[in-house]
Image (tube, rainbow, N blue to C red):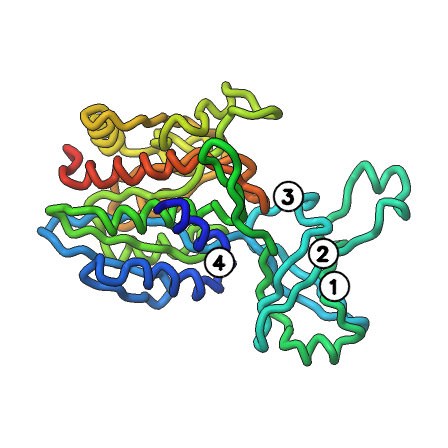
């Protein structure tokens, strides 16, 4: 089931540069379903189903936004940097997991309490530079004894939970939703082409794993699976994000106002035709903010015709992201059907 796979992936932990536990989970899920699984020098997991000389690359990033310890003070408090795009108020007073060398330790993100803030400070909110992680240690030596040091990765302590109407919430749906879609596709897909499923690293800090793997694979066309923002809840207008949860996966035409990906029109048409012929609901997006691995892939070597397929996901880059399981399932159906044919490039 997609839901149970997403549960396992969301509850796993893997910030940019520390994706090994997610790698192991994906490798286990794909065992027996692909012809080859390798790890490249960047840490990308590359799963291959062999076919003819045509090469298609599917990409989903494994990493989630998180934190990393940068300094430990004499009283045992941890200062940190953010890895990926955090909105500072989202972090304030969260519970976290500090992934030390002697095992995981629970901590909380602290800062100056509102009761002690003046009016101007309350209006501005707490900046990440003013926050710290409290693991209960009394001094720096106790922190060391816990196996925590400079460079230790930190993730949010939040677990997957079900909501009404086949909707779910959890951390790291960006991009464990895309990972779940790609895993299920590789388990079900039969294609005449050689299909490379690349579970990439370090997307949240610069689309890095996609760039190196695309160069090595040199695919004929490519699709990234990620998430995108819907305009179906208070605080955002449909004119700014004209897609909705529960109405099918989103095919990207343009993201980041063209500064990221301008999708190949023939690849988009191929997916559109597939969706229509198989009665699969899909949506289309011309977006103004955010981009995906497809941006790096489509600029590789002489250029790779590319687009992105994404389930609409609310509240991304927070610990309480929300999506509709049906949108992932429809995305799997679309990919499985599409990979029986090829775009007219």
Rendered image quadrant of residue 122: top right
Identify the disc placed on residue 134: 1
Looking at the picture, does residue 62 appear above or below residue 100? above
Circle 1 or circle 3, nearest the eye:
1
Q: Looking at the figure, which quarter contains the C terminus?
A: top left
Q: Secondary structure at mark 1?
A: strand
Q: Secondary structure at mark 3?
A: loop
Q: Secondary structure at mark 2?
A: strand
Which residue is painted at 54% across and 41% down in the image? 321
Circle 2 or circle 3, nearest the eye:
2
3D distance between C-alphas at marks 2 and 1: 6 Å
Q: Is 140 on the left or on the right of 307, as rendered?
A: right
Tell me whether the residue at label 1 lies in contact with that at label 3, contact meaning CB atoms closer than 8 angstroms: no
Whichever of labels 1 and 3 marks the residue nearer the N terminus, that label is 3
Looking at the picture, does residue 123 appear above or below residue 273? below
Circle 2 or circle 4, nearest the eye:
4
Whichever of labels 4 and 1 marks the residue nearer the N terminus, that label is 4
Residue 166 coordinates in the image, percent (x, y): 45, 35
Q: Is 323 on the left or on the right of 315, as rendered?
A: left
Tell me whether the residue at label 2 lies in contact with that at label 1, contact meaning CB atoms closer than 8 angstroms: yes
Residue 308 shows up from this direction:
no
3D distance between C-alphas at marks 4 and 1: 22 Å
Whichever of labels 2 and 1 marks the residue nearer the N terminus, that label is 2
Rendered image quadrant of residue 277: top left
Disc 4 marks which residue?
12
Residue 199 coordinates in the image, percent (x, y): 35, 55
Disc 3 marks which residue?
87
3D distance between C-alphas at marks 3 and 4: 22 Å
Disc 2 marks which residue?
109
Which residue is painted at 74% across and 78% down in the image? 142
Residue 207 shows up from this direction:
yes
Whichever of labels 3 and 4 marks the residue nearer the N terminus, that label is 4
């Amino acid at each position: 089931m997609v839901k149970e796979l997403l549960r396992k992936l969301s509850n796993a932990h893997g910030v940019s540069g520390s994706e090994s536990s997610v790698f192991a989970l994906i490798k286990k899920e794909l065992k027996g379903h692909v012809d080859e699984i390798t790890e490249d020098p960047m840490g990308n997991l590359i799963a291959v189903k062999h076919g003819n000389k045509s090469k298609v690359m599917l990409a989903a990033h494994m990493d989630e936004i998180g934190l990393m310890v940068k300094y430990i003070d004499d009283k045992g408090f941890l200062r940190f940097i953010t890895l990926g795009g955090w909105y500072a108020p989202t972090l304030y007073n969260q519970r976290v997991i500090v992934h030390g060398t002697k095992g995981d330790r629970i901590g909380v993100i602290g800062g100056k309490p509102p009761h002690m803030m003046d009016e101007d400070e309350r209006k501005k909110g707490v900046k990440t530079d003013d926050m710290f992680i409290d693991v209960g240690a009394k001094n720096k030596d106790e922190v060391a004894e816990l196996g925590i040091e400079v460079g230790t990765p930190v993730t949010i302590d939040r677990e997957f939970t079900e909501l009404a109407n086949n909707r779910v919430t959890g951390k790291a749906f960006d991009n464990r939703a895309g990972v779940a879609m790609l895993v299920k596709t590789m388990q079900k897909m039969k294609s005449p082409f050689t299909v490379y499923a690349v579970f990439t690293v370090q997307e949240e800090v610069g689309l890095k794993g996609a760039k190196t793997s695309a160069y090595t694979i040199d695919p004929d066309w490519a699709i990234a699976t990620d998430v995108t923002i819907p305009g179906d809840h208070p605080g955002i207008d449909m004119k700014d994000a004209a897609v909705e949860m529960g109405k099918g996966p989103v095919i990207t035409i343009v993201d980041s106002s063209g500064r990221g990906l301008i999708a190949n029109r023939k690849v988009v048409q191929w997916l559109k035709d597939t969706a229509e012929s198989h009665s699969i609901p899909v949506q289309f997006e011309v977006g103004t903010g955010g981009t995906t691995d497809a941006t790096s892939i489509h600029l590789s070597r002489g250029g790779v015709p590319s687009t992105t397929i994404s389930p609409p996901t609310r509240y991304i880059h927070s610990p309480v992201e929300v999506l509709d399981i049906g949108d992932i399932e429809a995305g799997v159906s679309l990919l499985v059907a599409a990979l029986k044919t090829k775009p007219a490039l």
